[in-house]
Amino acid sequence: MNQPLGDFPGGLKLRGHKKRSTQTPIRKTPLSRHLILPLQQHIGAAAVPVVEVGEKVLKGQRIARADGHVSVCLHAPSSGTVVAINEQPIPHPSGLSAPCVTIETDGEDQWIARHPVDNFRAISPHEIRQIIRDAGIVGLGGAGFPSFIKLNPGVHHTVDTLLLNGAECEPYISCDDMLMRERADGILDGVEIMQHALRAREVILAIEDNKAEAISAMKLALAARPHLTETRIVVIPTRYPTGGEKQIIQVVTGKEVPSNGLPIDIGIVSHNMGTAYAVGRAINHGEPLISRIVTVTGTDVTHAGNFETLFGTPISELLAFVETRREPDEPFILGGPMMGFNLSGDNLPVTKTANCILVGVEDAAPKTEPLPCIRCGDCASVCPASLLPQQLYWHSRAKDFDQTRDYNLFDCIECGCCDYVCPSKIPLVSYFRFAKTEIMNQERERKKSDLARERFETRQARMEREQREKEERQRQRKAALAASKAKKEKEAAAETTAADDKEN
Amino acid sequence: MALFRISPPYLAGTNRVTLQMLQVLLAMVPAVIAMVYFFGPAVIINIVLALVVALGVEALLLKIRHRPVKPFISDGSAAVTAVLLAVAIPPLSPWWLTVTGVLFAIVFAKHLYGGLGYNPFNPAMVGYVLLLLSFPLEMTTWLPVLSLADNPLGFTEAFHLIFYGETGAGLTPDAVSGATPLDAMKTQIGQQIQPDLILNQNLFGFVGGLGWEWVNIWFLLGGLYLLYKRVISWQVPVAMLTTLFILSMVTQWFAPDITGSPMFHLFSGATMIGAFFIATDPVSGSTTPNGRLVFGAGVGALTFIIRVWGGYPDGVAFGVLLMNMLVPLIDYYTQPKVYGTGKP
């Protein structure tokens, strides 16, 4: 049972700053007057609105449907009226706007009829996935990939291990920690459903050892379910980025996800703790995903903590609720300090992937001009993927993208460890993102031109073929003509001969 | 404070280039003190002269190249080059020798290649080798340890010798300098004298050259400090010293007449400063963990070969420069195995 833990190379021991936001229980954010709901809060195609402006909606009512396979539905987080379906600023690093549905809440918070599943074991995994998809559930760890897809092992794979990621390795963030402390039972509800959907042999709940209270809460909840014999809690060392999917798999199982592959290729599926909780709510209570727990913290936040927040709540209201020393329009970080991104708009809404809002950090990276790389190799020694960031940087900078691929650029998980230790303070991750984007653009261009060339070549071939066929037909016609002519002449000749014969 | 840089990560460690260079300088202090103790105050004069010239030229070149002077001059890399070169040049060398070496190191070996981070060769060693090739006589005679000197030199006399070529009393550097222990070893082995007998002469101490062994020990301790502080990685010094040790042990086994003991090699000449302070230069050295092992081993092997069969008493500088040339090749073939790929 207690198999030894694996390890990943590199990584950082960062100060957690978690206590700041774990002193108070999870609180509810007050209902906002307006809820702004971007149609795309997940990876994949944006949802398509199924409501009209002026329409009354109930809490939990579907307001947009999934479009295509990689997509999920969207629901009204509270009852009210749809007042706008238009472009609004969204919390995205680009700072661009995107289509959103805006609901003016009526304060009633009136639920639509919910249809809980009494016994999830009685329904098929396919039905479970359908409910999860209809409930709009995406990975709540930050990436926002539609969860029902990750609950479908497909016909070619069997799932050995369902891994629940409770590492939460980035500093400051504590929403999963608090969720585990307070709603361990709800998480296990979801875990059981997930295991059933995946037909996974075993379940591992991996939690970093800096979350003693969460670990004991989960252990207690697990002990109350003696039928879960193949479910266990694995306490893993606290080290950034152990919560990265590839790293946590390496730590817990000792296996590596193949490059360009998925965890399912080695029989593992991983989900976030918050996602498991959402799955439990969707199946056992019939509640779609309309809120999440958001950590609001940072050195400039007065009442830091975790807040159960309806999607669409303007972040500015959340910040006003916790009281900050932030000036209006001053930037804040969405996500953690290592992999989040900064935003400055005030009217941006909380979305499904907003796990943390961070205002002010200690040990902030300076905005100084970077010095040249001195090839010290500190970046390579902390890289959890065993890459050579110094070489990747060199080639990215020189736009020598073929070389960056040779150096496995696409195995970079952008954890930022290299940036953190760089003595020259080079923004390495930014260079790698740039190189990745450029390569993907080139790839797209290449595909486009390949397609064009293919089309051209096919057309060319078709025309040649037609030409050939035409010539063939002409030749045949000519031959036939010649043949019939010859035949006629022959007949004519024969007739003459016959006539001659007669005459003779 | 909520001012962020534009892109993640928003946290940064305390590691800085300047800090690393200052640690390197700090780690050299005990060995420099030992050199002053054994060879007199001329060492200090050399270091100060080299520092002044190096920082001046660095600032000038940054100006010429339109680079910001302050962040680059304070990165400390020019200072490290200056000190490394100054302790490698014989203490009583005339001032223009030091100046020439430093100028060549900073201008040609560093800035003409693009400055900090872009130099393929170790600047201090380029300066040193230029001097060694151009002024072999000046570069291979060294002050005897003070306890062996007929006329121990004070600060004023040393100053006069360096800047005017003779002391007030009319002494010239030739009169007060002699061969280094490594040089003596090489010359006398050439004269078919047994290494054991050579080591019994008063030029030698308990393991290496008299005085030199202590300088090496202090460089070793300084190097261990750098390892502890993680300014340098362990691969280069360990590989270099191990290679040097093994090669000298094997050679001594088969041909005891041609060289000194392994310990003699480890604690003589530039071995320790080379292993911990010169070959560990990140810019011109290998940057992969396994590459650093290869690089260090190469420097160790070349040092030994040059010491025993080459034309110069010591080979660290040549070893480092020759291995610098191989760095791109080494780096390419020593990439670590990346997560999730079978390929190394």
Image (spheres, coloured by chain):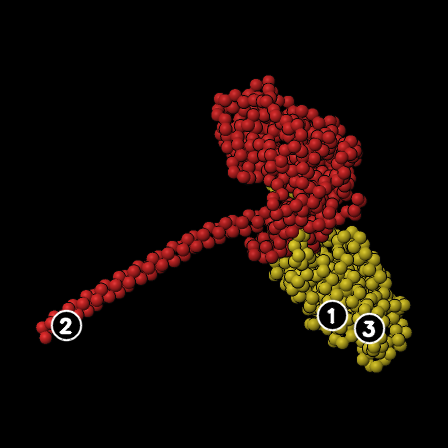
Q: Colour of chain B?
A: yellow
Whole-number angstrom distance, CA of label 1 to CA of label 2:
109 Å
The residue pinned by badge 1 equals B302
The residue pinned by badge 3 equals B250
Which residue corresponds to the image point at 61% horizontal and 24% vertical from the top-left? Answer: A114
Q: Count residues near mark 2 (Cα–Cα under 10 Å), then give few for <14, some for 14-19, many for 20+.
A: few
* Foreground residue among A232 and B42: A232
Q: Colour of chain A?
A: red
Place of residue B290 in the rendered image (x, y in percent of width and height, measured from the top left): 72, 60
Which residue corresponds to the image point at 85% horizontal and 71% vertical from the top-left? Answer: B261
Residue under disc 1 on the same chain as residue under disc 3 = yes
Mark 2 near mark 3, Cβ–Cβ under 8 Å?
no
Q: Specify the subunit that label 2 lies on.
A: A
Does label 1 or label 3 sit earlier along the sequence?
Answer: 3
Amino acid type, label 1: Leu
Q: Which mark is residue A497?
A: 2
Circle 2 SS class:
helix
Place of residue A257 in the rendered image (x, y in percent of width and height, measured from the top left): 66, 49
Q: Count residues near mark 3 (Cα–Cα under 10 Å), then give few for <14, some for 14-19, many for 20+.
A: few
Whether residue A443 is visible here, answered yes or no, is yes
Nearer the camera: disc 1 or disc 3:
3
Place of residue B185 in the rendered image (x, y in percent of width and height, measured from the top left): 83, 75
Q: Tell which residue pokes out farthest to the left in this image.
A: A503
Residue A158 vertical position relative to residue A285 in the rendered view, above or below:
below
Place of residue A103 in the rendered image (x, y in percent of width and height, measured from the top left): 54, 24
Whole-number angstrom distance, CA of label 2 to CA of label 3:
114 Å
* Foreground residue among A361 and A467: A467
